[in-house]
Amino acid sequence: MKFEDDLNDKDVQDQWRRLQAAIEKKQAAGEQPVRAIRPGWKTSWKTGWKRSAGIAASLALLLAVSIWLIHEPSSRILYSTGYGEQKHITLPDSSRVVLNSNSSLSFDNNWQPQEPRSVELSGEAFFSVVHTGNNQRFIVNTPEGMEVQVLGTEFNVYDRRGIQRVVLNSGSVRLEYKDREAVSMAPGEMVTRQGQGARLEKRKVDASRYSSWTSGRLVFENTPVKEICRLIQDNFGLAVSLPDTLLGNRLFNGTFPANDAEVLLKALMTTYNLEVAENGGGLQLRRKPVPPGNQGR
């Protein structure tokens, strides 16, 4: 599925123009400006929302990891990313991490050979962990109490909105929760938990799809539209609401750039015949009304 940068659909262009007009009306009335998306937005939208949303994201991430940093502030290293940003990190043992948008990673800057290698993650990251000669464990801790233990392997960890997900690409992983029995994973398996206290669910998946964002792609296979809207907010700081529950449960397929929310939004609008409206600083996607002459057909 491919979508061109330019909007060719006249109806879609009209929707963007109406949204921009509503925003300009707010600005003229002295209300807080809202960033618009429109044809030719490549500079204005991306630079505008990345600046303000990036600051907000950094503050939120600092708060999320402060509980880990308060006791040893001078011995910890903290990396964080804003909306639409990724970072490649090399750990003290030469293990590699790709930190996704709106995420943070912290760890001690002086790992000891006799102790586990431990990091704290908030958000999402892909890990390529080096196996040590003394079988030193590598542990990923998340704010929701999930502990991922490995020796040397590649895996993706996601922890947002109370939902945790671990996908194993290679090697082996052991998951531990304070309120659950440990779970062992094999390559190609995914374990998820949908909220505090929920049961763990393990199933076989295409592991490469869940780490495709590290190579600049978002791959969707029968993904609910509501999940895509959450991804847009988590990764780009743009709130997208869906008043239609049935629409939110529709399944979506396709491959898109991981750094371009506009292309993804246009694809949703075209695929499901949607219109867009400004909604308190975010966007609302809803079905286009049926023209009077077509009703009942």
Image (spheres, helix red, strand yellow):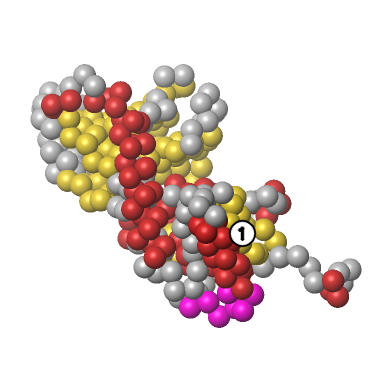
Residue positioned 79% across, 68% down in the render: 290
The part of the image, by quadrant, that contains residue 78 is top left
Number of other residues with Cα within 10 Å of mark 1, as a class: few under 14, some 14 to 19, many 20 or more: some
Residue positioned 53% across, 34% down in the render: 194
**Is residue 264 among the parts visible in the rendering?**
no
Tell me how many marks there are: 1
Q: Is residue 12 magenta?
A: yes
Q: Is residue 29 magenta?
A: no
Q: Residue 276 versus residue 154: which sits nearer the camera? A: 276
Q: Residue 59 versus residue 78: which sits nearer the camera? A: 59
Please indicate whether residue 30 sits to the left or right of residue 117 in the image: right
Residue lying at the far right in this picture: please name it.
Answer: 296
What is the secondary structure assignment of the residue under circle 1?
Answer: strand
Q: Residue 116 versus residue 237: which sits nearer the camera? A: 237
Residue lying at the far front in this picture: please name it.
Answer: 29
The part of the image, by quadrant, that contains residue 14 is bottom right
Q: Position of residue 261 (x, y in %)?
A: 45, 61
Residue positioned 58% across, 74% down in the render: 13
Which residue is disc 1 drawn over? Answer: 277
The residue range painted magenta reads: 6-13
Q: Against 39, is 129 above or below?
A: above
Q: Amino acid at mark 1?
A: Ala
Q: Position of residue 88 (x, y in %)?
A: 23, 51
Please indicate whether residue 82 sits to the left or right of residue 115 in the image: right
**Is residue 243 among the parts visible in the rendering?**
yes
Q: Against 266, is 162 above or below?
A: above
Q: Position of residue 68 (x, y in %)?
A: 27, 25
Q: Residue 16 versus residue 203: which sits nearer the camera? A: 16
Q: Position of residue 233 (x, y in %)?
A: 48, 49
On-image quarter of the C terminus: bottom right
